[in-house]
Image: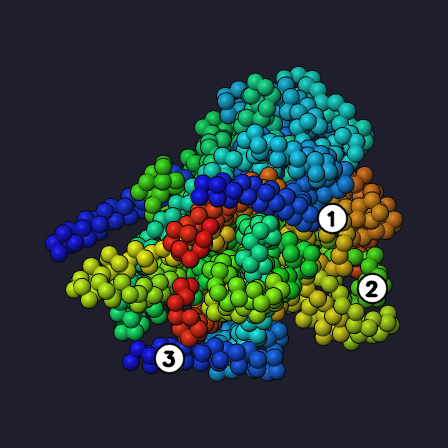
Amino acid sequence: MKAFFKHKNGLIGGAMIGFIFVVALAAFFWTPYNPLAINLHIRLQPPSATHWLGTDEFGRDVLSRVMAGAAASGTVALLSVISAVGLGLFMGVVAGFFRNWVDRVLMAINDTLLAFPGILFALGVMMIVGANKWGIIIALGLAYTPTVVRVVRGTVLSIREKEYVEASRMIGNSELVTMLRHVLPNCAAPVAVLTTSMVGWVLLSESALSFLGLGVPPPAPTWGNMLASSRQYMQSAVWLSLAPGLCIALTLLGINLLGDAVRDKLDPRMVVA
Amino acid sequence: MLSYIARRVALTVPTLLLVMVAVFALIHLIPGDPAQLMLGDAADDATLSQLRQHLGLDRPLTVQFARWLLNVVHGDFGHSITNGLPVLPLLLERIQVSGTIILAAVTLATLIAVPAGLIAAWKQNQTVDVAIVAGATLLLSIPSFWLGLLLMLQFGLKLGWLPVVGYVPLSENFSEGLLYLLLPIATLVMIESGILTRMSRASAIDVLRLEYVTHARAKGVSESQVLRRHVFPNAFGPTLTMIGVILGNLLGGIAVLETVFTLPGIGRLLVDAIYARDYPVVQGVMLLTALTYVFINLIIDLCYPIFDPRVTT
Amino acid sequence: MIFNRSIAFALSVGLVALFVQVSLAYAQDGSALRVRLSSDIRSTDPGTNRDDNTDAVVLHMVEGLVALREDTSVGPMLASKIVASSDGLRYTFTLRDGVKFHNGAPLTAADVVWSWKRYLDPATGWRCLPEFDGRGMTKVLAVEATNPKTVVFKLERPTSLFLTTMARTDCGGAGILHSSSLDSDGRWKQPVGTGPYKFGQWKKGQYIDLVRFENYASLNGPRDGYTGGKKAEVEKVHFMVIPDEIAGKTALYAGAIDVFPEVRSADIAEIQKKPQVKIEVAPAMDMYAFLIQTRDPVLKDVRIRRALALSLDLPAITEAVTEGVCQPNSSAIPSSSMYYSTVQRLGYRRDIAQAKRLLADAGYNGEPIKMITNKRHSESFDSAVLAQAMAAEAGIRIDLEVLDWATQLDRYTKGKYQTMAFIYSARLDPSLSYEMISGPKSTQPRKVWDDSLVQEKLAESTRSSDRAKRQVLFDELHRKMLEDVPFIVLFNSVDAVGLRANVVGYKSWAPAKPRLWNVHL
């Protein structure tokens, strides 16, 4: 009974994420209307047969924008997480493994990154890179790297004393080989679990940044900037905020359910939610 | 152990310095300056340079940074360019507001989450557990400003139970001040308890599998005693760690809530100051935030060995 | 069990008591008006460290020799009579009788001289000093009190804008202050002026309270701009700092504030539908426009600029972004100005075919043109989005670049842009409007229109005080502007103010500043 239920959670989560993924992928090729097509005659219309989720303040079809937004938000989230995990793994493994001045320098950099306020960072990065989605990706990637570093380093610290690491060294493997072949794979489980949570956090961060005035610039839709600009119409056109808001919530729900199943499979002893 | 603590503390100084230099450089190099903002579309070169000189912005960056640092060491954080207020008292006032909300919310959330997580773990995969997990997951999936706005519209506007805008310091009038804080705290509690419930449930599940729990059960100890004496203390450790991380993250995310509820907190102060290019305020807030982060991380680092004996110092 | 229930009961009683107490506290109090400010004021010293919100609050407390009338012309305020010499170099102001400062002291010429000496002192940091110290329109050679009721200003150069500039809100109205506004060390303390409200309390970042001045000596007659009859009908005005627009709107609906200035056009219809709130609208003078950098390699060709203007459906943009509240205007002169003639109404009419022809002639190959915009002002932002879509129909490719306001202002000041959606703040005289947009780009890169002929005509218009002559000059300038297309004007803003239904006497007006006298609940 227990096993079946755990399985079911993962299935539901997987199904949700799968659905959204398919929609996002499809959005690259087809949406009911052009998400950027402006039509001033049909502004702010509630959901109807022709526009399933209604239209926004420029008469653009909300459903198409939600689909395109899935693609955009998804891309931003995935690329940010990949950058954070990539950089975090590198820094975390090196720091945890070597544990000397390298560790201290890396941790100092890590703490600096952690202490940096997100908005200043995002603003700064966007000045340099330009106010586009690459700026957001870099900013969010760097903002979440410290979390990955902490988890990875913690894991490395706890396994570096293990026998197989010692053994690897004894048979003459270089530090690099030891790191790559023995230490790194053992980080996979905690990092995998962290990754699933992080996608959710990044999605929320993107919407918060859009709310504060940064974020992927319009007219391209992301769930975050759709939610942010729907705020002024909360009373008159509530469907404008329900659509992206529910999408974010449901995606996160799916991610978390899936993440639970992933965690259960890989490392039931992991304590990261 | 003591030397480890001392070393760790000493390490924080270069980190702090690094952060301050990075912030200073970034905020000054971003285009736009307060003189321009004050003069708006009528800014001509002569008036601009006069104003910049008046504000001390014409000197080279290194000089400006050195002066600022020197003053800070003497306890002078400078004055806000926007309204001339001394920065340090302003910071302390604002941080009280944010701090009250965060601490109240996290405490309440913990009080809700830990028992909820424990119950869920104890009754794992039964209806109660499913309900709790689903509820917690849903709560943490909602963007904070959306939730805040929904609550404000429902309780503030439709029902009129709570004020939608304004702030009275608790020190001035506790009961009135509390009403202004209820909605933002409620929003934060809802989201944080989602996160913390899942966390405490996960760690409780872990512990429940451990041998000494089985052993206690075998001895005939009652379930509630098992929970209280064995599961709870061990499950709490990792949750405490995550609380530390969450607290750190919250300092950044609180800006959103403060904007929605119009609270004079430190998050909004930072965002407003960045947009207004109010350099002394940005630098002051950053220094304070960096100090807080560093302090929290220090505590976490020092706590690791206590809770997880696998980590050696 | 019983214990739990008692706790629950006690808690509920406690909560109810709390609600009641606070509802009494923040409910509407008939002796105070609560007004929203979108940002905290910068200081209480007129015309120095200021922005629009600062001016709005300060001008309740201080008054100058002259002030704006309701139609934005300049009329006497503290002066009862103004005589200008025929050569325009001497202005004689006769002060009104019976005017008192907030501290009870009577207004005398000595106070005027003291105030002006302070304004003209560079250490004060008066925003409008450049206009009066020789760098700008004229130089004030002397300010003298010939007798306790008469002040004489001696100027170096004549200018038709002397009184206009004195009355400018961003100059603090050149408000006359009593010397007790400064402390014993000569530092600014608080404003001791002659206005209908006096300074109460400033809780920085949160609110400013102004208190009724019991001995205010009002002019006779009805409300008339910043002059006219003024009466503080409420005891206190409580300006609350609510930066977030939506929080402010919610506060208005909930009855936590009585007055919400700067309502966005999109919200006007919503407010009109609700019974507990109402709206006051009047045309204002901010200018929404698309600026074009005429030195840009692509845009230096006037044909391309013209094609851009012809590709846009300007009335449709205005209608959409302002929900029909604002009227389209293609002139640099605001539509509420008395100089807004038939010629000024001329503009562009959308012609995609013609636009395409011009583009082909100019050899435009779809090069992307960047348009800078920002999220701070939604009408401006929306207009950029629409322009992008419309220009695409003629084959012009516009890429939007969203920046924060400070960065955009920086680019504007340096002229580093191709196009941008910009908002100019109000100018009260057409000469000032044209001066705002034209000038030599080498020394003033922020100017959009660099043309020596234009400079000549502009200078002429400031020298002359003859209305008909100035109208001719402005009309010529407008025609030339439509041909040169240095920028494309969209519309002028409105002063839309949201009010609780029981607020009586409030009037919106062109300078778009809230005035809380002659208003009560």
Residue type beneath disc 3? His
Residue type beneath disc 1? Thr
Residue type beneath disc 2? Val
Instruction: Label 3, secondary structure: give it.
Output: helix
Residue behind mark 2: C298
The quarter of the picture where residue C348 lies is: bottom right
Report whether residue B35 is seen.
yes
Number of the front mark, 3 or 2 = 3
* Residue C298, horizontal then vertical, whole percent: 82, 64
CA separation in Å, label 3 and label 1: 62 Å
* Residue C146, horizontal then vertical, whole percent: 69, 17
Q: Is residue A116 or residue B203 the one in the foreground?
A: B203
Report whether residue B266 is seen.
no
Image position of C94 with respect to C285: above or below: above
Colour convention of the picture = rainbow
CA separation in Å, label 3 and label 2: 61 Å
For disc 2, the chain is: C
* Residue A161, horizontal then vertical, whole percent: 49, 60
Quadrant where the C terminus of chain A is found in the figure: bottom left
For disc 1, the chain is: C
Number of the front mark, 3 or 1 = 3
For disc 3, the chain is: A
* Residue C480, horizontal then vertical, whole percent: 82, 57
Residue behind mark 3: A7
Image position of C104 with respect to C222: above or below: above
